[in-house]
């Protein structure tokens, strides 16, 4: 609950855009752990993962 509130607040304040501007040209590395096919406490659900990759893919060049 706290994490979602914190992330929602950061999003509302424009943290994503600010971070992108401050780190323009700097590679970003995402390390993701704990996946679950269904929503589960402290795990990333499949739907959350897809939304994350879609968002990052629209705004960044993905390299595997």
Image: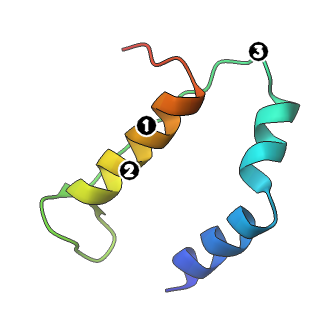
Residue occupied by mark 2: 51
* Mark 3 vs mark 1, CA separation in Å: 19 Å
Q: Who comes first in sequence, dot 3 or dot 2?
A: 3
Q: Element under label 1?
A: loop
- In this view, 9 is above or below 57: below
Describe the colour scheme in one phrase. Answer: rainbow
For the image shown, how many numbered marks are present on the structure?
3
Q: Quadrant of residue 14?
A: bottom right
Residue occupied by mark 3: 25
Q: Who comes first in sequence, dot 3 or dot 1?
A: 3
Q: Residue 23's x, y, as percent?
A: 80, 28
Q: Position of 49 compared to 1: left or right? A: left
Q: Residue 7's x, y, as percent?
A: 62, 68
Tell me the residue at 34%/70% (across/down). Answer: 42
Residue occupied by mark 1: 31
Q: Position of 22 compared to 62: left or right? A: right
Q: Residue 50's x, y, as percent?
A: 30, 46
Q: Who comes first in sequence, dot 2 or dot 1?
A: 1
Q: Residue 33's x, y, as percent?
A: 32, 48
Q: Position of 34 compared to 60: left or right? A: left
Alpha-carbon neighbours of circle 1 within 10 Å: few (<14), some, or many (≥20)? few
Tell me the residue at 49%/86% (across/down). Answer: 1
Tell me the residue at 43%/13% (across/down). Answer: 63
Q: Quadrant of the C terminus?
A: top left
Front residue of this view, candidates 10 and 31: 10
Alpha-carbon neighbours of circle 2 within 10 Å: few (<14), some, or many (≥20)? few
- In this view, 44 is above or below 50: below
Q: Are marks 3 and 2 in contact (CB under 8 Å)?
A: no
Q: Element under label 2?
A: helix
Q: Element under label 3?
A: loop
């Amino acid at each position: 609950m706290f994490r979602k509130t914190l992330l929602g607040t950061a999003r509302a304040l424009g943290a994503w855009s600010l971070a992108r501007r401050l780190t323009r040209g700097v590679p970003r590395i995402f390390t993701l752990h704990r996946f679950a096919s269904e929503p589960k406490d402290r795990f990333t659900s499949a739907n959350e993962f897809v939304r994350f990759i879609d968002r990052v893919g629209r705004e960044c060049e993905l390299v595997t």
